[in-house]
Amino acid sequence: MNRKLLLAANWKMNKLSGEAREFVLSYAAKLAESSVATVLLPPNTALVAVASTCKESGKGPVGLAFGAQNCYFQSSGAFTGEVSPQMLVDLGCRYVVLGHSERRAIFGESDELIGKKVKAALDAGLTPIFCIGETLDERNGGKLEEVLTRQVRVGLELVSDADLHKVVIAYEPVWAIGTGVVATPAQAQDAHKFVRSLLAKRSAQAAGQMQILYGGSVKPDNCFELMSQDDIDGALVGGASLEVESLLALHKECVRASK
Ligand code: 13P
């Protein structure tokens, strides 16, 4: 297995552009060179600041990249309040988070809508970080596999088998997001292995290449064990990504787990 680990920092609706700028300068200055890339995912209003400071930092897109937390599936038009994949590419984004559980639960995004966004992002040249995950009721009701199967099937329906490997998946159990209740390494590994088996039904080759990130209460003190699991290829982190020292500590743990 030669999949590299990826550390993705989902800042959600946090940080003004000046704060984002300071964060990037400080983080980049202390970031050790490694095979673990960091992807910063600021709110749209801070994307320009992050783009320019990432460039100034000289770390290059392999060590430090950035992206957005959402986009629409159309390239332009009368869609008030939305941004297109092309607009994100225009700012230098390489990634976009799609189907985050907060988008699904608070903003009513359906599997079908997310599937259209995944396809549009890929067509624009972005790497989608496509989020899936079950609620506590679904898990307790024995529906984990059913939910993941549906989310993966519909969310990736419009992606050709040849393009599948370009998608990054993020398994984020809803009950672990922002709660401090992290999935055990075994629970996460089981879910990741199951997701990879679903992908393998589409393309065994793509399934072997695809990064599947874990998200949900990842902290520096639980990161190493999670990242050491066979089918976990990185982390999508919310709360613990908001402070420079904490994100650096997470990066260190990812590097340690990649050896
Ligand atoms: P927390 O790390 O704050 O639990 O958030 C996880 C998440 O939703 C990342 O996308």
Image: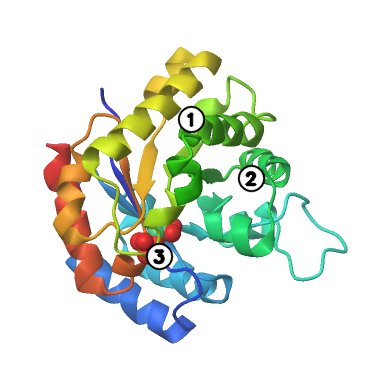
158 vs 41, left or right, is right
Q: Which residue is mark 2?
A: 121
Which mark is drawn over residue 145? Answer: 1
Locate residue 116: give its quadrant. Answer: top right
Q: Which one is nearer the viewer's eye here, 182 or 27?
A: 182
Q: Residues within 10 Å of mark 1 (few under 14, many from 20)?
A: some
Pointer 3 with pointer 2, Cβ within 8 A: no
Q: Is residue 241 visible?
A: yes
Quarter of the image that includes the C terminus: top left
Which mark is drawn over residue 55? Answer: 3
77 vs 230, left or right, is right
Secondary structure at badge 2 equals helix
Foreground mark, 1 or 3, reads 1
Secondary structure at badge 1 equals helix
Q: Which one is nearer the viewer's eye here, 99 or 66?
A: 99
Furthest-front residue in this view: 141
Q: Amino acid at mark 2?
A: Ala
**Residue drawn at 17 percent across, 62 percent down:** 249
Question: From what the image shows, is residue 174 above or below residue 155?
Answer: below
**Residue drawn at 49 percent across, 27 percent down:** 165
Q: CA distance from mark 1 to mark 3?
A: 42 Å
Ligand 1, by image quadrant, is bottom left
Q: Earlier in the sequence, mark 1 or mark 3?
A: 3
Q: Is residue 238 visible?
A: no
